[in-house]
Each structure stands twice: as C-alpha cells, then as structure tokens.
Amino acid sequence: MQDVLHYKVEETQSGVYTVSGGIVPIQIVNSKKLSDKDNFWLKNLNDSLGSMKVMDILTAIRRRKEVPLVKPYIRVVLHANPGSFKEAQKMGRRKETLEDVLEELGYYARAEKRAAAKGKAEGKAEGKAETARNALAKGLSLKLIHEITGLDMKTIKSLKTQCETV
C-alpha cells in the first residue's frame, strides 16, 4: 500500500494502525495485538469469547454505572457469543451478576412484555371462543355469533362441530 498508492501506514499504538494519504484517514485495528488494559472494550468485541471473559465484561459493565450506554455493545457481544453467555449463566457463583446485567439491559423486561402480550392475546381468543360456544349452546345463529365475537365463520363452524361431538 505504501509503495503503490503512496499511503502512509503508522502504528499509533499496539494493534492500531492509521492509514493516511487518501481522501480520508483510515484506522485499522488488529484486536489480537491490542493490550487488555488500554483497550478492554475493543479487544473483547469479537465472536470467540469464553464464558470467563463474558463474566469479566459483565463485571466491568456493572462497575461502570452507565449500563444504558453499553447496551449496543453488550447486544453485539451477546449475539456474537450466545454459547458463552449461556455457559456463563450456568456458572452458579456469578449467576446473579449475569442476570442483573441482562435485567438492567432490558432483556428480561422485553421477554416478559412479549410473553404478557402473547398471553393476553391467547386469553382474549379463548374468551371469544368460550362466548361463541355458549352462544351456540343457546341456539344463536352463526351470523349473530360472528357479529358478537368477531370470530370468522370458519372458526365458529369448527366450534359448532366440536360442541356437537361432545
């Protein structure tokens, strides 16, 4: 690159290179050469973390007190290392730390919201089906049951068949 394009490549710190001479300077990072001390967050932004390294990251996040600021980082690390996160969660002595961090990041809250919404929808559908069964038992017309419950005619007919076979 230096000989052909006349770009200048300079190692600004261990594992970090700046390429200049083009339209804009470019920074290249070799994470294997980064020091753990000076580049903790950048060095651990990869897809080959073990469970102990995941626990180190989570411990560092807990110490920062700015959990919302690291949400995008932890989301990337979590998705790149799902096995290590699961393994770290199984580790009994530090399980609370992982659960606390994931809860603070909103992972549990989102899952609970989805589960609650799904449960609510299922309950609503079951309530409509129960109303339709009761209406069928009273002899109401399929059309009236459709108007009352909002269920489609196919579902109402299926419920009617179920009621007749019981």
Image (cartoon, helix red, strand yellow):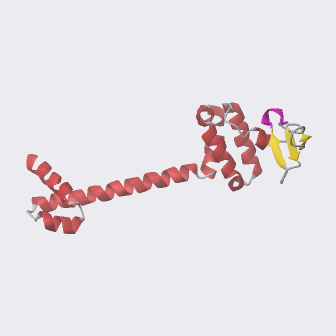
Q: Is residue 96 visible?
A: no
Residue, far front: 4
Highlighted magenta segment, given as a residue range? 30-35
Quadrant location of the N terminus in the rendered image? top right
Q: Is 146 above or below relative to 92?
A: below
The front one of 59 and 155 is 155
**Residue at x 66% of width, y 41% of height:** 77
Residue 148: percent from left, percent from top: 21, 68
Residue at the image point whose x is 70% and y is 42% from the top: 58
Q: Nearer the viewer, residue 140 or 2?
A: 2
Residue at left offset 36%, top offset 57%: 121
| Residue 155 location, quadrant | bottom left
The answer to whether one can see residue 157 in this image is yes
Q: Is residue 83 left or right of residue 161?
A: right
State the image quarter where residue 35 is shown: top right
Estimate the x, y position of residue 59 in percent, counting from the top left: 72, 42
Q: What is the count of numbered marks?
A: 0
- The picture quadrant where one finds residue 42 is top right
Residue 57 placement, left or right of 20 = left
Residue at screen point 65% across, 33% down:
93
In the rendered image, residue 130, in percent from the top left (x then y), is placed at 22, 57
Q: Is residue 18 magenta?
A: no
| Residue 32 in picture, x, y percent from top left | 79, 32
